[in-house]
Image: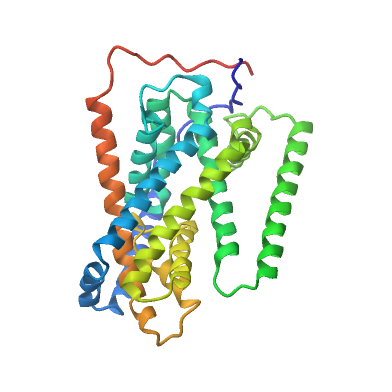
Amino acid sequence: MPSQRPIQPPTAPSAPATPKSRIKMIVAWAVGLALLAWLLSHTPFSEVREAITRPSIGIWGLTLGGLLLSYGLRSARLQVVLALDDHNRAPRRWLGLRTDALRVILMHNAAVNLLPMRAGELSFPWLASRELNLPLPRAVACLLWMRVQDLIVLIALGVLLWPGVPLLWRGAALATMVLGWWGVAWGMRRWYGHHPEPHTDRATPSSTGKVAQVLSRLRHALLEPAHHRPMAWLLTLANWSVKLAAGAFLLSAISGSNWGTAWAGALGGELAAVVPLQGPAGFGTYEAGVWAGMAAHLSAHSPALALAVSAALALHVCFLLCAVIAGALAWLLGHLSSPPSTPREPPARHAP
């Protein structure tokens, strides 16, 4: 059976680091660290130490197990979105997961967790090219699509499970989201169908060229058939449901809040990643997001809210350590177990 041909966007040269980008990086570090320092100034360090020891071994095990399961679900989603099994054979599988896709997810996740301003996202095209033999433009389009998909699913989970919202309002908001997304996607496909992609001149001004690159990536992310597979949406929903539930159990155990309030805090921490300025390893913005999510359901003098920052810090450190250790193991195992007898084939050339 013939395999689907992925749509190939034109290649784009990588932009070198500029003084402006360095300034943005410095500002991001300063904002993140200042925000974290302000939050910790209202949280005694004794409470932070106590927060780490308060949950039982079972709660810590549940959190770690949920986080590891989310890694596997992300890897499965990557296999579906890239249609990997349609184009090349897996070097190895572990519990049904392709080990090459799992390595990409784990190393990319570690980079995203370590670097400020979401700079770790830039590692994905390089990792996908090296580990999955994927053309760089296709990897960029895939990354853009997965981030759009993540945001849509996170908002949908907030609509469905945010505490205190009447059922009728939940249904109306979810229906509006579904119809809105369907309408936008249908309209963009129709417009793209009547407007072929123009040839981009690389001699054009930088601002015009950047806009053209973003529009081109959006076009190819939207029109790639594998991106719209129902299984990709189901795996994205499962991934975020598991990760948020794992975080909510730990936040609830540390702060003493009910599970719904802890869920809102975990969701707020993840949505904080949308903020343009991100400090090193997301410190500051993540804790602020967790505090804001919990504060929406607790009084200003609530004992649980007083423990929200220390609980968020404990959860953040847990996520960060797991991401770094898993990424390091993936990198090490990839180098130790790479079979020299099965060289990678060159990237397939697709007709325009």
Q: Nearer the viewer, residue 150 or 161?
A: 161
* Relative side of 205 to 196, left or right: left
Q: Position of residue 190 (x, y in %)?
A: 77, 37
* Relative side of 87 to 169, left or right: left
Q: Position of residue 153 (x, y in %)?
A: 56, 53
The image quarter containing residue 154 is bottom right
Seen as rendered, the residue at the extreme top is 341
Q: Nearer the viewer, residue 204 or 183?
A: 183
Residue 34 is at least partly visible in this image = no
Seen as rendered, the residue at the extreme bottom is 301
- In the rendered image, the quadrant that contains the N terminus is top right
Indicate the colouring scheme.
rainbow
Which residue corresponds to the image point at 64% horizontal and 19% vertical from the top-left?
352
Which residue corresponds to the image point at 39% horizontal and 42% vertical from the top-left?
17
Location of residue 55 with respect to 225 vertically, above or below: below
Which residue corresponds to the image point at 52% horizontal and 33% vertical from the top-left?
80
Which residue corresponds to the image point at 30% horizontal and 41% vertical from the top-left?
327
Location of residue 209 with respect to 21 vertically, above or below: above
Q: Nearer the viewer, residue 245 or 39?
A: 245
Residue 254 is at least partly visible in this image = yes
Q: Position of residue 139 (x, y in %)?
A: 49, 32
Q: How many marks?
A: 0
Q: Position of residue 203 (x, y in %)?
A: 58, 30
Location of residue 244 with respect to 258 vertically, above or below: above
